[in-house]
Amino acid sequence: MSVDGTGGTAATGTSPDRELAVLRFQSELTTQLDGVREAHKALKIALRKIRDFFDADEACIAVIEPDRAGATPRWLLPASEWEPDLFVGFLREHRPKLPRPILLASFPRRERPWGIIGLRRNGRDFERSARRELQRVARALGKLVERADRLAIAEVRARIDGKIMAELRPKDLFYQILHGLRSLTRYDHSGALLIHDPQRQALDLVAEQIAWRKGKSRHVGRAIPVDAAVQALLGSNEVYVFDRIDGEWTEARGRDACALARALDYNTHRDDEPAEQSMLCAPFATRTGAAGVIKLTARHVGSLGRYEARLLRRFVPQAVIAMHNQERAASLEVGMLEAEKKHVMANLARGVSHDINNALGSMLPLVQQMRADADEERVNPAVLRDDLEQLEESVQVCRRIFNGMLNFARGAAQHLGTGDVRRAVKSTLSILAEGMRRQGVEVELDLAARLPAVRGDQGDLEQLVLNLATNARDSMPKGGTLRIEAVAHGAEVVVTIRDTGVGISDEDLARVQEPFFTTKLQGNGLGLSICRSIVWGLEGRMNIESGLGEGTTIQLNLPAVRADGSSDA
C-alpha cells in the first residue's frame, strides 16, 4: 500500500490516525470476544460496538439466505425496518450504489457468504473511507465467528465424550449426537441415525429429531429397505452432500450416490410439512461391514455443504461408539431378561404348586367319599350337589392357574411389535390371584374399557406387569390392597400399580433400579432393572414413588400405537 506526501493512505484516503483507530478497534474487539463461545452472543456484542465505533444511529446483522436471493435481518439495534431490496441489490452487484447514510459489508461463515452488517445514519452521510473500514471490520468479525464455531465444536465433542464415559444409555446418546450436530450445523428440517440390519437388508431408524417442529419423529422404529446399490454405499465411509434440484436429488461432487438420498427420503411431503431440500449422509462401517448412517437435512437448497460434511465426519466415530454401546447393552439386557424370566418362573412354580396342591388335596377326599357313598348305595342328592360344587371350584382354580401360565408363555413367544395392556394385566392376575387371596391381598382393577395397543412385544409387557405385581405382593406379607389402573391419556397409555405394602426407604429408592441391588433375602436384584429396560424398549417412562410404611406407587407411561401402526415417540 502506498502512502502520499501528506501522510495519508493514498489507496484508501484514510488518515494515519483513523487507520490506527481502526486497527485498535479490531484488536479490542478480538480481545473482548476472545472468551465468547457462542457465535450469536459474539455477533450481538460486536454489533453494538461496531455501531458505536462508526457513530451510526441504527445497525443490523442480516443472515444471507442459502440461495443468496436475499438476507433476513436477525439482530437489530434498535428495532427498525430495513428494506429487503437493499440486501438483494448488495448481493447481486459487486459494488452497488448505496445512499451515503447507509453502509453494508458482508462476512463469511462456514466457508460461504453468511452475514451482512448494515449501518445507517439519520440525516448524516458516512465518510468516503467508511465503506472500506467497515469491510475490514467485517472480515475480522468473520474470523471471530469462525473461532467461536471452533470452540463450540470442541465443546460439543467434549460433552458427548463425557456422556459416552458416563455410559449414557445408547438411545439417549444418539439424541445427544443429533442435538449437538444441530447446534453446530443449524440443520432446520431433521437429523436421524439409522442402524444397518444386514439380515433384513434394511436400515432401522433408531433416532430422529424433527427440527422444524422441535420434537421426535413418528417414524422412529421404522425399517427402511435398501437394495444392493445402497448397500454398497453404506460401506463407503464417505460423506455425501445432496440437493434437490427440480425435484430430483443430485450429489454435490457428481458422485453416483443418489440412490442413498432416495432411500432416505422417507418423510412425507404433505402440504403442512416442509420438504427436505438439502441432505447430508454419512455412512459408517466397522470391521464387520456397514454399520449405519447419520442423516441431516435442511429446508433450503444449498443449506448443507462441504463445511457441514467435514464437521459431520468428525462426529462419526462417536456414532460408532454409541452403536457398539447399544449392541452391548442389548446383549446384556437379553441375558438379564432370560435370567429374570427363569427366576420368575421358578418363583411362580413354587407359588402355584402350593395352590394346586391345596385344590387337589381338597378334591381327593371328596372323590373318595362320593365313591364310598355310591358303593354303599347311600347317595344323598343334596350332599352330592354340594360336593360337586366344591370339586368344580377346585378344578376352576387349577384351570385359571394353568391358563395364566400358558398365556404368559405364549406372550413371551410373540414378537408382534404391539402389546395389549388389558390382556397383560388379566394374564398376570390369573396366575397370582389365588396366592394373593390366600395371603390376604385384595386386588382392585380399574382398566378402561378401550385401551389402544402399545409399542413392544406382548411377552415383554406381560413380563413387566408380572414383575411389578409380584413385587407388590411380596411387599404385603400380612395382606393389603393392590390396585392396578390403566387409562388412555393423549398419545400414551398410563398404567398405575399401587400397593399398601412396607414401602421403600429414600436411600434404597435411589438404587432400586440398579442391576443386582435388592432388599429381598432371596432376591437377585434384576426385577426392577429388567422393568426399566423393558420400559425403555417400549419408548416409555417409569416413575416410582414410595416411603417406608406408606406403600409404593409405580406409574408407567407407554406410547400408544395409532391406527396406522405408528406412535408419537
Image: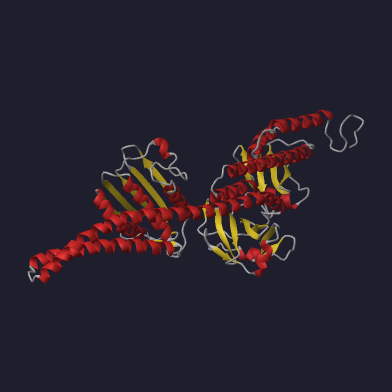
Instruction: Answer whether residue 465 is visible to the viewer in this image.
Output: no
Q: Is residue 366 left or right of residue 6?
A: left
Quarter holding the N terminus is top right
Instruction: Answer whether residue 537 is visible to the viewer in this image.
Output: yes
What is the image's colouring?
secondary structure
Task: Looking at the picture, tell me which residue is in the foreground, 26 or 94.
Answer: 26
Q: Is residue 286 left or right of residue 27?
A: left
Q: Is residue 370 left or right of residue 460?
A: left
Which image quarter: residue 123?
Answer: top right
Which image quarter: residue 508?
Answer: top left
Task: Looking at the picture, tell me which residue is in the foreground, 223 or 509.
Answer: 509
Task: Looking at the picture, tell me which residue is in the foreground, 383 or 21.
Answer: 383
Task: Looking at the picture, tell me which residue is in the foreground, 147 or 288.
Answer: 288
Q: Residue 430 at x, y = what percent?
A: 30, 59
User: How many numbered discs sit on the rendered protein?
Assistant: 0
Which image quarter: residue 398?
Answer: bottom left
**Going 69% across and 31% down the picture, which residue do you hit?**
32
In the rendered image, the vertical position of residue 256 relative to residue 149, given as above or below: below
Q: Is residue 102 left or right of residue 468?
A: right
Q: Residue 212 at x, y = what percent?
A: 55, 53
Q: Residue 540 at x, y = what percent?
A: 45, 52
